[in-house]
Image (cartoon, grey):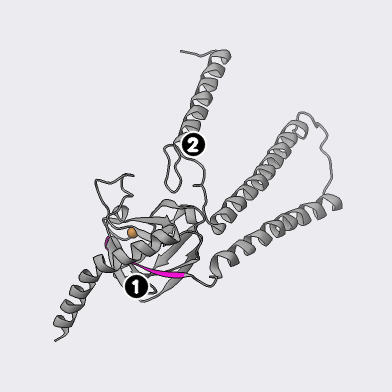
């Protein structure tokens, strides 16, 4: 069956309308701190770093769109105007100084324009400001252990909770941090390399056995934020989510008091068994 041009056009239009509708409904369901169905954009940022990443992403998108359209325009011009049929007698041009200077200089200027905000962002990410709180995240096969060395030195495990929403992201014990505070995250691996990543915070850092990496975030909105281990670490790599609950200072202080009691017994039994094992 052959389709007429009008038929194909209508089909394409229908597909485009469906695509836009899907994207719009995906955006409508988008919740802060977690992925949405049919999402094609970056998650909404809630830290200065992620806002910067999103800005840089859009900035690059504009530049690359411009470059792509320019190259497409040049290609079409060459195909239409400079083919053998249109030019029975070929031109003998071999040099054009202006064009040669332009096609050297313009890409250099574009790269410089990209390099400046790129380095600024890199320094923002890597230069950890004075931290209000430190949380150590240890990647294990296949869950995370969070330690709070500043707040009474307790630690707990955070495992995937099958019954919790969102699916494959909910955990039994969330990492809890206060809002608008600089949180330094230290990461290490207990067995193999894992990676601690939370899209809404704009952080992703490897958790490597025998090393202590660090990154930071300052969440400006309270809420739940989800991430995943982002370094293939074994059979249950897909089942060790990261869930961070950002709360007010008061709620954080209350949580610390509860957590200290709740997780103290676990850590003392662990300590006792460790001591027993060494004797
Ligand atoms: Cu992993």
| First of labels 2, 1 by sequence position | 2
Q: Nearer the viewer, residue 99 or 234?
A: 234
> Vertical placement of 17 versus 104: above or below?
above
Q: Quadrant of residue 186?
A: bottom left
Q: Nearer the viewer, residue 110 or 72?
A: 110
Q: Secondary structure at mark 1?
A: loop
**Residue to which mark 1 is pinned:** 209
Q: Is mark 1 within 8 Å of ligand 1?
A: no
Measuring from the top left, give residue 36's x and y in whole percent.
Answer: 43, 40
Measuring from the top left, give residue 112's x and y in whole percent.
Answer: 71, 60
> Vertical placement of 23 versus 152: above or below?
above
Is residue 135 a member of the stretch shown in magenta? yes
Tell me, yes or no, whether the two marked residues, 2 and 1, touch with CB atoms within 8 Å: no
Give the quadrant of the N terminus.
Answer: top left
Please indicate, yes or no, whether residue 87 appears anywhere in the rendered image.
yes
Please indicate whether residue 264 sits to the left or right of residue 46 in the image: left
Q: Nearer the viewer, mark 2 or mark 1?
A: 2
Q: Is mark 2 within 8 Å of ligand 1?
A: no
Label ID, residue 107: none
Name the residue rendered at 80%, 52% in the picture: 102
Q: Which residues are magenta?
A: 133-142
Please indicate, yes or no, whether residue 140 appears anywhere in the rendered image.
no
Measuring from the top left, give residue 27's x and y in whole percent.
Answer: 49, 36
**Residue to which mark 2 is pinned:** 27
């Amino acid at each position: 069956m052959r389709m007429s041009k009008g038929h194909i056009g209508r089909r394409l239009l229908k597909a485009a309308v469906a695509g836009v509708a899907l994207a719009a409904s995906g955006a409508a369901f988008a919740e802060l701190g977690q992925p949405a169905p049919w999402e094609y954009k970056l998650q909404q940022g809630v830290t200065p770093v992620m806002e910067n990443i999103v800005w840089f992403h859009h900035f690059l998108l504009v530049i690359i769109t411009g470059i792509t359209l320019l190259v497409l325009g040049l290609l079409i011009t060459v195909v239409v105007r400079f083919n053998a049929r249109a030019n029975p007698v070929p031109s003998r041009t071999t040099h054009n100084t202006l064009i040669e200077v332009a096609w050297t200089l313009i890409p250099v200027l574009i790269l410089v324009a990209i390099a400046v905000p790129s380095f600024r962002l890199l320094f923002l990410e890597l230069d950890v400001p004075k931290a209000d709180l430190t949380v150590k995240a240890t990647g294990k096969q296949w869950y995370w252990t969070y330690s709070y060395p500043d707040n009474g030195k307790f630690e707990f495990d955070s495992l995937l909770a099958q019954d919790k929403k969102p699916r494959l992201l909910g955990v039994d014990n969330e990492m809890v941090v206060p809002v608008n505070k600089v949180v330094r995250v230290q990461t290490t691996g207990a067995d193999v390399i894992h990676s601690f990543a939370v899209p809404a915070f704009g952080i992703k850092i490897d958790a490597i056995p025998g090393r202590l990496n660090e990154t930071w975030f300052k969440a400006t909105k309270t809420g739940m934020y989800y991430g995943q281990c982002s370094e293939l670490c074994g059979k249950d790599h897909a089942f060790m989510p990261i869930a961070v609950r950002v709360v007010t200072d008061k709620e954080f202080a209350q949580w610390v008091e509860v957590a200290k009691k709740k997780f103290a017994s676990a850590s003392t039994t662990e300590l006792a068994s460790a001591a027993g094992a060494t004797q």
